[in-house]
Image (tube, helix red, strand yellow):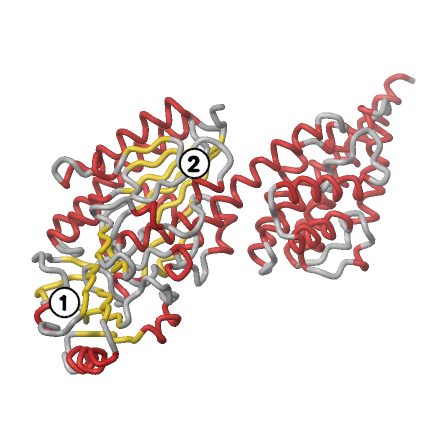
Amino acid sequence: MPSKYSAIVIILDGCNVESLRKAKTPIIDEIMEEGAYTLKCKSVCPSATYTGHASIIAGTHPNAHGIVGNSFYDRDGRRIVDFDVEDVNKYLTAKTLFEIVKGKSIAIGEPITRGVHLAVPKSEVQSGDPASWDSYAMKKSTELIRAHRPVLTVINLPGVDRISELHGPFSNKFLSYLEEVDTLIGDLIRVLDETYEDYLLVLLADHGMVPVHRNVNIYEILEGLDVVVCVSHRAAHIYISGEEEREETLNRLESDNRFEVVMQYSELSRYNLDNPRSGDIFVTAKEGYELGLEPLRGSHGGICSGEFIVPLIVNKREYADLLDGSSITIINRIVTRYLREKRAIDFVREMLKSTDPAHGWDHTSRVLKLATELALKHDADVEVVRLACIFHDCGRGRDPRGHEERSANSAENFLRGEGLSEEMIRRVKNVILMHHASPEELDTVEEKILWDADKLDALGLIGLARCLLEEGYRGRGIEDAIEHLLRDVCKFGNKMHFNETKKIAEERVREAMDLIKKLRGEERDKNADDI
């Protein structure tokens, strides 16, 4: 079934943060301004294509998903497994985002595709001139999105990587190319606006890129030793046949000043690379050097900041809490959180059809927006706050008495079906249960945020409009609505928990009181005219 909302992940393969800063990219800049972003997201080690993509799509590090580089040595089979030749999906040891997401998914140019419904393979996207790869990927993306309206789309733009490798990450050629990619993203956004009611757009790189000026022949360095070397650009796993080879291998590598890191397997947990497929020794080159044999001007694989630190941009502010100190493994969580919320909203909107119009989805939507801003500002758990907001009135129906418990129970049943942890469910329930408690009884910042956001919507002109709606729904008149608002002002007007909500409450109470005065003045004038 076509989806009315979607998560779209665009991987700017190999995009260096400084390159993105230098290029003129007004579309990406606008997404950053309106949403949330970090230019300090961490890639994984090695910062290589297959390892990076596996970490994004599986939401975990190489020690868990098993893709430890662009190739590895299969000790049992005594052969090198090269992912440019073999299907990387067969070797993945963790669930993919495509397998987790409920609904149709598509992937374009993405090497990790296990569980996807429809894929345009990487080989097809990369069949022409590198300068055309990304425009082809975007063309296929728009065609498939229009035709299938999937709930998840992952688009890899490998041309970004290749143009940067061929010309260098800071070359005019590459910066101009990034500007062309920015235009392509703008074209895609127009299609998304036409196709979906709402969508999450995530932009990131799997790794960055650093300039390189010469090659290091690691095979030559280790010539004569009984070892197997698997190079991933500026990193390499080295598999040794026995202990007698280890000391000499380490000696040759450590005495060569072109290597940044020389580590034994026992040290690889530092980089979440301690997987049985990893080498007995792992190395990365110093900046400026490439371990592969191809002459390049840009490369990656190591741990220099230019290749290990990447951009991560989201078009929605509510994900800012997940970006600080993040790694590329966070994408899985961002996407699943968004899609879970959208399913929750669909569920709640259906339930709210049976309640009075003052407590329908419009009210919940306003509470959700304000509470999200408060949660971000006051370092609360944004996910707990947003889920509690979405569900807080869903059990109200026609009788408000006891609706907190009904709403909390509905949230519990729904979220348990979504596979949310019991601890998270407990916290969401507690916030919902406390949203009509006395303000002095509230303990957590999340409880206080929902309480304030909910009660602020009962004040001011919106508050009066809601009172008119509710009293009219119950067959009562304007004066009943005014009395209702005055009761709310007395109960909530000076009970807010945060400086900004206190200020908003003061302004709204003043506006409401002025309007009530005018309304009652008009009523007196009308009565005088009648006499």
Which percent across, then down, holds residue 358?
74, 31
**Which residue type does callout 2 highlight?**
Leu
Identify which residue, 300 or 164, lies in the foreground.
Answer: 300
Neighbor class of circle 2 (other Cα within 10 Å; few <14, some 14-19, many 20+) is many
Q: Residue at x 22, y 82 (%)?
A: 247
**Which residue type does callout 1 highlight?**
Tyr
Q: In this view, does 343 lie above or below 307?
A: above
Disc 2 to disc 1: CB gap under 8 Å: no
Q: In this view, does 482 lie above or below 255?
A: above
Residue labelled with disc 1? 289
Which percent across, then down, holds residue 343?
58, 35
Residue labelled with disc 2? 152
**Cα–Cα span, label 2 and label 1:** 38 Å
Q: Which residue is drawn at 43% across and 43% down?
A: 315
Q: Which residue lies furthest to the top in this view?
A: 530
Q: Residue 171 carries which label?
A: none
Q: In this view, does 205 lie above or below 8?
A: below
Number of marks in picture: 2
Q: Which of marks 2 and 1 is nearer the N terminus?
A: 2
Q: Is residue 518 left or right of residue 13?
A: right
Identify which residue, 507 or 404, lies in the foreground.
Answer: 404
Which percent across, then down, holds residue 204?
34, 49
Neighbor class of circle 1 (other Cα within 10 Å; few <14, some 14-19, many 20+) is many
Q: Is residue 173 left or right of residue 267?
A: left
* Residue 502 visible somewhere in the drawing: no
